[in-house]
Structure formats: structure tokens, C-alpha cells
Image (tube, rainbow, N blue to C red):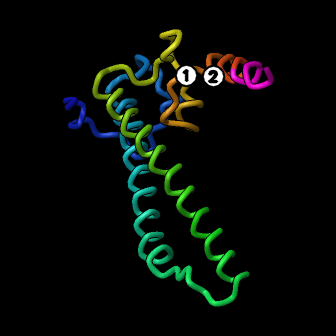
Amino acid sequence: MSSSRSVIVPQDYDPEKDKGEFMNPIMLEYFRDRLIEWRNELLRESQETIKNTLQETELQKPDLADRASAETDHALELRTRDRERKLINKINQAIERIDDGEYGFCEETGEPISIPRLKARPNATLSLEAQERHERLEKTHRDD
């Protein structure tokens, strides 16, 4: 575990205005807090869904249209939960990168990922340029 846990992030802190070293301890703690908050929010929503939706969903409805609708809703909810589970995994990996000192740097180029990109997508592993290149390559291979 990183020793940066003792770092306090000022309430009005904005990493875009930080003129210090890229990924300094305050910046790292700022992103760690954002990632943990995001993960906790996803976990809370997941628990509410399990409690309120999936446990109360009765798929054995006498009317075929009602049953089909309930099954579709149920399948959609399970797909959403699966996507969120994968996202939580990526959030956990981002927190590990903070602990390992690798957070904020592009996996492909080693260059810093822009702060606005990290604020928008704190679990980003690629710079915007590398992500766009990756998506272009994916699109050309998909069209084959």
C-alpha cells in the first residue's frame, strides 16, 4: 500500500491548476479519492438493484407479453450489472496503478495522460492520441 494515504487533498483542489510535478502526492490522492468514490457509488447502486429489482422480479407471469417484458428487463439489468462489474475491475486496476506509481501515464507511449482526460475518465490507461489510434485500428479490423 502507498504511503500517500496521509496526504490531505484540499477541498477546492483542482489538478488542472496544480503547477507542481505531474502526479505529485496530492494529485495522486485526488484521483484515488475520485476512483474510490466512483467504485462505492457503483457498488451501492448494484446492491440497491439486487435488493429492489432482481429479488422482487417475478418471471413466472401468466401473461406471455408480461413475462417476456419482465425477462427482457431482467436480462438488461444483468447485462448492466456485468458492465458495472467490469468497470469496478478497471477502477481497482487504476487504484493499483496509483499504488505502483504508474497512474496517469499512457500504457502505450509512457507519456502523461492529460489531466482533463483523467478527470473525465479516471480509469483511463491511454492518452487521448493513443486511444484514438487504438479505436481507428479497431474500426479498420472490424470492417475487414
When the figure is inspected, residue 81 is found, relative to residue 104, above or below; the finding is below
The image position of residue 131, as x and y in percent, is 63, 22
The image quadrant that residue 43 belongs to is bottom left
- Measure the C-alpha gap from mark 1 to mark 2: 6 Å
Give the residue at mark 1.
126
Mark 2 residue crowding within 10 angstroms, few (<14) / some (14–19) / many (20+):
some
Rendering quarter of residue 55: bottom left
Mark earlier in primary sequence (1, 2):
1
Residue 98 or 144: which is nearer the viewer? Answer: 144
Taking depth in this image into account, of 81 and 75 the one nearest to the observer is 75
What's drawn in magenta, residue-wise?
A: 138-144
- Asked if residue 32 lies in the magenta stretch, the reply is no
Q: Disc 1 marks which amino acid?
A: Leu
Residue under the point 28% across and 28% down: 99
Q: Which residue in the protein does label 2 denote?
A: 131
Instruction: Locate residue 10, reporting x and y percent.
Output: 37, 41
Q: Quadrant of residue 1?
A: top left
